[in-house]
Amino acid sequence: MFHWLERNPFFFALSVFITISFAGLIEIVPSFAQASRPLVGTTPYSTLELAGRHVYIKNSCNACHSQLIRPFKSETDRYGHYSMSGEYAYDRPFLWGSKRTGPDLMRVGNYRTTDWHETHMKDPAAVVPGSIMPKYTWLYENETDVETAYAEQLTIAQFFSTPYNKAIPMKDGTNKIIKMGDSIAEANALALEEAKVIVADMKDQNIKDAVESGKIPEIVAIIAYMNSLK
Amino acid sequence: MNKIYLWGIIVAVTMLTITYMSVIGSKGGLNGDIVNMFAIGGAVALVVIIVFVIIKFVRQMQVDTADGELSDDNWDGIGEYYNAIPKGWAIMYLATMVYAMWYFVIGYPVNSYSQIGEYNEDVAAHNKKFEKKYASITGERLVDMGESVFLAECKVCHGLAADGIDGSAADLNVRLEFRTVKDVVINGSNNFLLGSENPMPDRYGLMNANKDYAPITDAEIDAVSTYVANGMSGEGGDVFAGACSVCHGDDGAGMVYVAPNIAAYDITLVTNVLNHGKKGSIGAMPAFDRLNAKQKEAVSAYIISLSKGE
Amino acid sequence: MTKNGPLEYDYSVSKLFIMNALFVGTIGMLVGVILAWEMAYPEFNTFLGEDLAEYTNFSRLRPLHTDSVIYGFTLSAVWASWYYLGQRVLKVSMAESKILMFIGKLHFWLYFSASAVIVLSLLMGITTSKEYAEFEWPLDLSITVVWTLWGASIAGLVGFRREKALYISIWYFIATFLAVAMLHLFNNMEIPTMFVTSPAGETMIGAWWHSVSMYAGTNDALVQWWFGHNAVAFVLTTPIIAMVYYFLPKESGQAIYSYKLSLLSFWGLMFVYIWAGGHHMLYSTVPDWMQTMGSVFSVILILPSWGSAINMLLTMKGEWQQVASSPLIKFMVLGSTFYMFSTLEGPIQAIKSVNAIAHFTDWIIGHVHDGALGWVGFMVIAAIYHMAPRIFRREIYSRSLMNMQFWIQTLGVVLYFTSMWIAGITQGMMWRAHDEFGNLAYSFIDTVTVLHPYYTIRAVGGTLYLIGFLMFVYNIYKTTSAREVEEHELQNASPMGA
Ligand code: HEM
Ligand code: HEM
Ligand SMILES: [Ca+2]
Ligand SMILES: [Ca+2]
Ligand SMILES: [Cu+2]
């Protein structure tokens, strides 16, 4: 039987393919039916938050930071409630990471603040002595790519019915609407509005001036994203 | 004994010693934590199994000879024996297969394992263990406990010495810094310091009783801020008495439901800051609801102990 | 070439891939060494100055390291081996068919160009964040084309073969081809964002290369680690097994110990590997049963993995003098041993309670490099050492240099994994530790600063490994002009100069 296969490359390849494919079918497909439903209170990312998420990915922060709180007392003490599947419903891609050189960031918005990030990202070791996190000085100069974030919002609204501009029920019974612009100009305006809220808590005058003049440095976007992680 | 066994033992013992020393010497320690035991057990098993299995094969290279029935096939000069499958390997293979089947059909369903269930049990056990201990902790021990919370949670912002790291967070060795007081007097404050929304008015709401309730002046603001930041002493006491003591009391110790203690930290104030966070001239202080009541009490005790004697 | 004369194999494509493996291997490992020093001494993040720090910091460089050593170094070596041994065990020469030759060359040059674009794009920060599948959709497409060309080459050589039965190495190459094709396609399901139109009618909004994953959250994680785990299986394992099954018996002149063992290990590996991906998501939000599945299958996986390694070690039965005298065989025997090591370590780390500590720590990084440096690295080096004399028809320039390289690199690997082992367990335990009051015993930064000595040791180990690799590159370079040898000297043991 096997000798026969080894002389018939086509059937050999076919057998290999069958052997390797059905594990995927059994393990992955069933989960698709349930795993992408949002938890009540989970909202899609706003324009600036999404742009900040892109900055996070661009700089591979996930190389050092996880976003997955495992159900252990030691982790929930340190980071807050363990992660639940529905909280990730709008995460494309997921950003669990696989290495914790730095702490988990799943809920960092709960216990770190705009002004703290502002000084920390510029020189981590100055804020946390002994930190081995790199300085991210260029985030203070590079401008945020809001348009790509907007394109992504449009795409996910169209293909995955991500609820932008729709009432989303919150835990306390109220509704929340995450706005998405009707045009590039409007998307930029929305992002700028969010940026103004962030820079109000910042100290760096250059950043404040930049936002005043309508530009959004990457640091502002990434802080918006950090603050959204709750 | 063949020298290779000696080598095996040396390698295994060296690796195990390194592991042992680093674990016992490490700050984590075994702690009787079952998960720690598993990890160490795994590491030990790994070293021992590998070293001795490899020695077995090396011995075969050294003393055995290759033989067996050659198959007819030959590829680029490479032949192939029809040797039987090594027994140990075959048995282990079968055993793991049987184990897997047992596990899926019986082990797993019967256990009805749930990782969240396991977590809930762990937390309950942990809390039970410590709640008893907590209840009796007071005085110095409470301060020690508070320091432990502080070092794990707060030092990233307030610094190891609780001095606020060059002014980027509040210096907790003093009750209030000049800049905070001045900012609050000018702009007011609305930080739930009393546990509920109960704002302190801004400068236009602060009248100096000593001066016919005239609104507080710039000079007076500086004076009173110095006075408060100095631990309620020095110049400016008169302004304080005139404009502030109605709410904060003559000695600045505050009044229940009216205004917080600004002469010294107290547990109510710290607990409220931890429950609601705080946003002031220095920056934003996040809320720490996830600490339990005893931890909040302890960290308050620690902060109070820091500013003692100021 | 005459009909009846001996086949003249044509190694020109193989040679190109070997060059690329040496070149990208040097770069990839150099970047690895830089990363290691950056973790020990963060000042290195700006080693080209503050202005270039955006391109030299740890996080920007890390994907460059992983992708260049896996897809640049390892895959090049795999393909070099394919274009070398594929001809020999199937008894067809690339020179026999212009089409095959064209496919081979096109395969190389497209791969080479795509790699260059990948390097640039990673430096620019164009990534989708998925580990080992960072590339955006235009690159995914090029990768698909490159992969298809390899498939065409396999189909071609196998189709023209004169050797009826497929040799074991060919089984593994076919499996590699099929599995990676499947993994790549499904893990890269993504929608380019440039095709969308805003309500205001604007098109081509934002970066044209950007895309968004078809899967969200937990599902995305499931697909990614089904991919990630099996990318390890089918890029860092099966093609390397294909290599060891050829180069070890060939170099030593020994027959494969047991056909049955080859057979059972192969089909066992095919069946079991795919199920084990769940071990990357233990204690996550994927359903418990799937995690359990990953854990249990990982333990079973020891056996089919060890099967191949045992088969190799038993092939050397009674041949200790060869192991002792030939550095080339040393590389392969130690490589097989490291393979056993990492395929026992992996399953142990896949046990849920062990993973509770190991996951997210440096212990995993240690595991990765036992396999990557000890198994993949050593096998690639051995394969190239074996091929070089046959491709250039010259003896290997220096045996003593090779011996020295072997010991330096072995020391490097040992330093690497022991330090990461200790670092990982220490870190894992400190994260879990509660003090006498039931509070967390350490703030996160305490668990970072204790690792400094281990990070330094790792960096030293990595540097040693890199030095060894440079000695290897030099040795191969000098081989191209070393003493010429006769055909008959090339039958088994490779000729080596002093
Ligand atoms: C029986 C075989 C193996 C099993 C069961 C296994 C198991 C594991 C486990 C449990 C992890 C850690 C997942 C986590 O907690 O993050 C892991 C990670 C890894 N292993 Fe293995 N392993 C095996 C063989 C190998 C081999 C031979 C290599 C070759 C180099 C390898 C390369 C890797 C890599 C690169 C990762 C890191 C993945 C990431 O980025 O997180 N493994 N493996
Ligand atoms: C000179 C040799 C090398 C050095 C010094 C080195 C160093 C490193 C460092 C410092 C990291 C990052 C670890 C972290 O984030 O904590 C890393 C990751 C990695 N390296 Fe290497 N490396 C070397 C060679 C290789 C080779 C030859 C391969 C593969 C064939 C490889 C595959 C990987 C992989 C897959 C990862 C990611 C692991 C994970 O995410 O779990 N490395 N390496
Ligand atoms: Ca990883
Ligand atoms: Ca992709
Ligand atoms: Cu895996």
Image (cartoon, coloured by chain):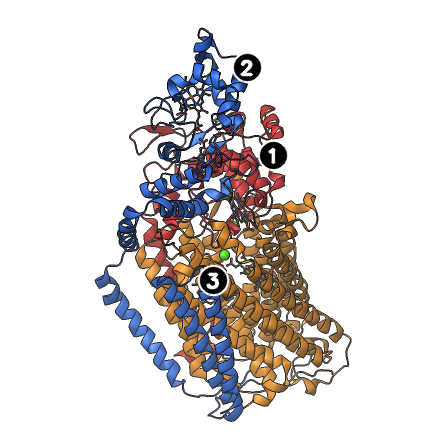
Chain colours: A red, B blue, C orange
Secondary element at tag 2 = helix
Amino acid beneath label 2? Asp
Q: Nearer the viewer, mark 2 or mark 1?
A: 2
Question: What's the residue at 70%, 81% (across, down)?
Answer: C399
Q: For the residues marked 2 and 3, what is the alpha-carbon distance in whole angstroms?
A: 57 Å
Q: Is residue C421 left or right of residue C483?
A: left
- Picture mark count: 3
> Please, is residue B175 above or below residue B34 in the view?
above
Q: Position of residue B90 (x, y in %)?
A: 37, 81
- In this orientation, does residue B231 appear? yes
Relative to the observer, which residue lies in front, B53 or B306? B306
Horizontal and vertical percent position of residue C392:
72, 76
Residue denoted by label 1: A143
Q: Position of residue B208 (x, y in %)?
A: 45, 11
Q: In which quadrant is the N terminus of chain A drawn?
A: bottom left
Query: In percent of the image, x 36 and y 40: which residue is there?
Result: B296
Kindly report which numbered mark, 2 or 3, lies closer to the viewer in this rendering.
2
Q: Residue furthest top?
A: B212
- On screen, residue C480 versus residue A196, left or right, reads right
How much space separates mark 1 and mark 3, taking CA atoms?
44 Å
Is the C-beta separation of discs 2 and 3 under 8 Å? no
Badge 3: residue crowd in 10 Å (few <14, some 14–19, many ≥20): some
What kind of residue is marked 3? Ser
Element at badge 1? loop
Judge by depth and name the residue closer to the eye, C407 or B120: B120
At 41% from the left edge and 27% from the top edge, which residue is drawn?
A: B191
Numbered label attached to residue B218: 2
Name the amino acid, label 1: Glu
Give the labeled residue for mark 3.
Answer: B26
Where disc 3 sits, the SS reads loop
Quadrant in which the C terminus of chain A appears: top left
